[in-house]
Image (cartoon, grey):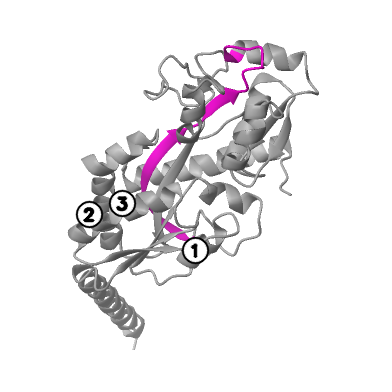
Amino acid sequence: MKYAPQKARVVCACTLLVVVWAALTMTTAISAGYPERPIRIIVPLAAGGAIDIIARAMSPQLSARLGQSVIVDNRAGAAETIGTELTARATPDGHTVLMASASFVVSPQFFPVQYDVLKDFTYLTQVTRQPYVLIVNPSVPATNARELIAWIKVNPNGVNFASAGSGSLMHLTGELFKASTGVSMTHVPYKGMALAYPDILAGRVQLGFPAIITALPHVRTGKIRALGVTSRAPVESLPGVPTLHESGVADFEVQQWYGVYAPAGIPAAIAARLNQEFAAVTKSPGIADLLAASGSEAVGNSRAEFAAHVRSEFARWRKVIRDANVRVN
């Protein structure tokens, strides 16, 4: 009788080993047969936008590499949170993934959501990064960022900056610029940057931080002036335009970025496979060239590198939002 407890412990240990072995065997079997059906890329924006174009361009290569159809599913609305929540609630088997912008970490800080970006997702890879460009109407008496900052400081109540909407990364870029330089500006939100350009071109709004691809036509015709890019390195498509860091706004860097995610809990082997395939396609000549043409840089990094980036960006923009007391309308 005195050996009964020891025997019970042995039986429990053996049972646990059997359960673990069975789970590992099942996971291996699932991973070996992956993918078993078409893979869905949820794009949380309307068709025709930048992320949608990239996802659709990547789909044929991903399909060929994975041996299954890859379908883009647009689920727009609520600052990308509808499609993001749909992904978080999807079965974690690698057949549903999300391709989203930096709004992935920004939107939940403004809107009530039913998911946690730090816990409810498997980070797969970063697809791209793309800087913004500081533009001004030609009537603004500044040819560089230093002159602009000095001009704003003597006109503290007369300068407006445009963005693609309250809480957008363009909006937060303007708030970070204000905090980094000590200037005072009034934010003017629009429903997309395309709607802001008429007011910038007319001089009703003095400046903004748009994506380079949308600003280029106006810069090349001289209708607006580019004063600096928000990356740490100059941009080939804007020759002669310095970085804001080089122009005296120390350590200033903002980049929009797109990434790929799956629901939390997908098998590690499937996560590794998806990282491998998405990263390879991202850096393939056709996709890298497409990204470069839009002022973007292909990334295709490891899961660990992407996870570190997401967490860092979440914390960074949380601080900017709190420090500037940013609110959305």
The quarter of the picture where residue 318 lies is top right
> In 3D space, how far apart are the residues under numbered discs 1 and 2 (Cα atoms)?
22 Å
Q: Mark 2: which secondary structure?
A: helix
For the residue marked with disc 2, what is the amino acid?
Gln
For the residue marked with disc 1, what is the amino acid?
Arg
**Residue at x 45%, y 57% (from the top left corner):** 47
Q: Is residue 175 visible?
A: no
Extreme right residue here? Answer: 157
Q: Mark 1: which secondary structure?
A: loop
Residue in front for this viewpoint, 199 or 303:
199
Q: Mark 3: which secondary structure?
A: helix
Residue on which disc 1 sits: 75
Residue on which disc 3 sits: 57
Percent x, y of residue 324: 71, 35
Query: Which residues make up the magenta segment?
Result: 120-145
Residue on which disc 2 sits: 61
The quarter of the picture where residue 271 lies is bottom left
